[in-house]
Image (cartoon, rainbow, N blue to C red):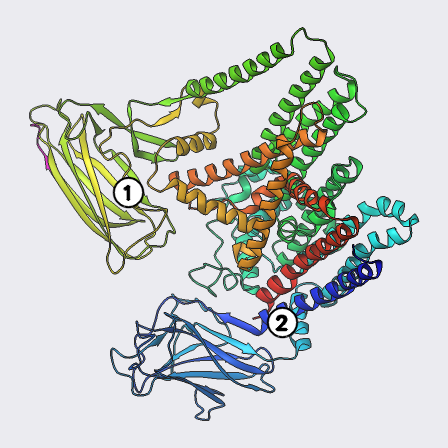
Amino acid sequence: MQSPAYRVRISLIVRIALPVLAALYVLWAGYAAATQRRYGFANAVPDELLAGESIGQTFIARYDGLSSVEVHIGTYGHQADAARSPLVLHLRADPASAVDLATATIAPAQTLDIDPWYTFSFTPIAGSREQHYYLLIESPGATTGKAMTLFWYQPPPRADPYANGAAYRDGTITKGDLAFGLGYDAPPLQVWTSMLGEAGANTVPVLVYALLLLALLTTIVAISLPHLARRFPRLAERLGASSLVTALWLALIYGLLFVVIIPPWQGPDEYAHFAYVALLDKHNLDDGAVQALDVWNTGRDTALIEAINSSADRNDFTRRLVGTTAPGSPTRTDPFVFQQVRQPPTYYWLCALALHAASAIGIDADPYTQPEAAIYIMRLVSLVLGLLVIALAWVFAWRLGATKAPLPAVLALLPMHTFIATSINNDILAELAASALFVTLAILYKSSFGPNTTQHGMRRKEVTLLVMCLVLTGAGVATKATASAASLPLLGGGLLVWAAYKLYRRNRATPHPSTSGHRVRSWAIALIAAILAVGAFFVVCGPDDTRALGWYTSYTPVQRVERVASSTAHDGAYVIQLGTSQTAMQKLIPPLIFHPALRITVAGWARLAPEQASNAAGAARLSIMDGAREAGVITTTLTSNANWTRMELTAVMEQNAEQVVLYIGAVGEANAGVQFDDLSIRVEGIDRAWNDSIYKAALVDPSGENAPWTVRSPFANVVPADVRDMADALLNPQSFSKPAMWLAYANTQYRSFWGSFGWLSIDLPTPLYFIIAVLLLLALGSLAVRALGLRARRISWRALLAFPATLAILVAIFAGFAKQMALTAYGGLPSDPQGRYLFVLAIPIMWLVLSGLTRLTAFLPAWLNAQARYIAAIAIVLFAAYCLLALILPYYYGW
């Protein structure tokens, strides 16, 4: 048993030392990120660096105390070769200077990693801020076969990764840049004032400082209030009364910091959502007029596109975008700028109304002439909607008493959620609609199954709440597809659980002659429901025996090629049949899939359909396309004797081809067409093996022996096309590995739910993802133990609500994965289900996580429990501050 004095000492350490250490850590992490900056774009090497040759790079030092330079070395396998040539670094004032400010050498005896980043360190240079320097690398005595090289970026026309310098080859300037990095031993105050000053450049610089000060004061007060309430009991009531104000104030300050610090266009697809609002603003909120525009052709608003592109260039959009192939090139949003016009207009009306209101009070926020100002107005609309979500979380947690955990404050300080909730994006409106539905379901559950509820019939309040649930579900469906994936299962599961438990309580209130008989009827109902569900699946879905699996005449909409039974098939009992001038295809490698140069060989057998006239003539064609480029083609003339003719085609695909599609086709005079059978494919890496775990460039159903499973008619006529495509992709084999793809989806969605800011450009450090995963496993384990211990007689309304909440989360994840897989299989670009798609269920997700973690603290002594909760509060604030100040701020303003 610890003494009171010991407890006091522990409390003082936790409550004073821990916050101070947390604040110092955030400041240090932000400083370290800004003073170790890497400009790592690379797409080539300038061959071996031989004796008498040099590679260089000019740059401008950002801070005082320049102390190191990093370069990305290409070792050519010599990383442990003591006979290799040395690399010598010279730091000079400019390319014309011969005076070394610093030098460093990589000796041959020094073992390196394969193609490493190597840091040359030297004595910090005082007064280096804003000074020009020249980095020169030589390799004295280097000979062919014993030399190394450096990675650099040699761009297509107009690209420029590093704006403040250029790469040199043998003293001659090039169009590109080295892959290099800079390190500083700079005064911390200089670093922080520089970053914060740039962060406020698009608004008012002092605004960032004011918001940070308010955030600090708010955090101190919020963390201290529970302790003060215990010391001063009268504060306890005030604390409960002001908890909504506290949560909203936290969300407002933290959200405003994101609004002003995140550079324009760095929200996901922000320019496309912006364009929709701009069109509505231009056409006086008339969505019909906007929808009537041919935005891709005659109705193309070139002035709006130019305004967006110019603003994106001013804000370094392509340099800040991880994964871009042309960093620093002029922004070209033209192919995608109007892609959001297909969305329901509700969110965009709100933003356009805000622009009208800003204009009415004299704020110039015209999207065409002042796009940056318009961006901040629209982001404020998202912020207001986000505050409404926080208010709903407060109603759920405090007014309904759903949890003792500070759910509203945690949601307000969840960095990735705040980032999405302050971007121009209709995700936040979808979240608001789904959150309102979830809270309404909670009110329904509490009113029906709360501790003081005894009535078993339908009451007026319950009817009203049921109607509200239906209305809110419709509202969610009308905002975005992600809301549909969340709201529909939330409604369906919620009402099913509500009705079942309502019936259970009524049956318990009515005497039964046999308890065992009641159990039998319950099991029978469950069994009948399962049988009906399976039967419904087979009624709605089934194989289409007239079509060949995997072979398409069109992907939009999905149209499959015909297959016919044949006793003379070259392989099996079916053949693939094409009519005159008809083609079928398979997408071997989707767009934007990275792969080495490949040699693809396709072989197969073709013949004229046996029912051809004796004098018929025709030909079969195989071709492999690299985007619009015909990488290989073969055409074989066929005769009418129904004999099979072998065809073989080899095509060489360049590294990272645009996309690879195989076509088979019928050409000539054959009226009944051409038949193909027994096709095969062989894929070989030319210079290295291709070991992608997802994409294999494999043929699906090469002999046409399998029928695809599809949604049957007449159901296909009423099911939305997106749902049909998702069912199609799920039920049928694809040319990629589904398990590997879904594992990759899960990884991307998990990482981007907790923190992957920008266009998935700024990830959390790997240890943080691991720590969060451990906490999630603990929470899930706690919830699982709780669920296993539930008894129907004592189950609370909160536990009941957890079932539809969990169902909705699982369905949303499943639907997102299926949607993205269908896009990869049938059209568009391969993409991942981002974590932001799950923020539509942010309240139930965080409620379940916090409930599981809170139960773990119940086993601690009361005084230790209080310390654990305080440490958790510090951890939440630390995470929020770290993401904003140590990740986001240095990434965008540490250039």
**Residue 414 percent location from the top left of the image:** 66, 51
Which quadrant holds residue 117? bottom left
Residue displayed at 54% across by 43% down: 340
* Whether residue 20 is situated above or below residue 773 in the rendered picture: below
- Badge 2 amino acid: Tyr
Q: Which labelled disc corresponds to residue 698?
A: 1
In the picture provided, is 702 more to the left or to the right than 160?
Answer: left
Residue furthest to the top in view is 513
Indicate the quadrant containing the C terminus: top left, top right, bottom left or bottom right: bottom right
Residue 556 position within the rendered picture, expressed as x and y whole percent measured from the top left:
39, 35
Above or below residue 159? Residue 558 is above
Mark 1 lies on a secondary structure that is loop
Asked whether 639 falls inside the magenta stretch, the response is yes
Amino acid bearing label 1: Ala
- 652 magenta-colored: no
Residues 702 and 656: in front is 702
Residue matched to label 2: 31
Residue bounds of the magenta highlight: 636-641
Quadrant for residue 604, please give it. top left
Q: Residue at x 25, y 77 (%)?
A: 145
* Relative to 126, 547 lies left or right: left
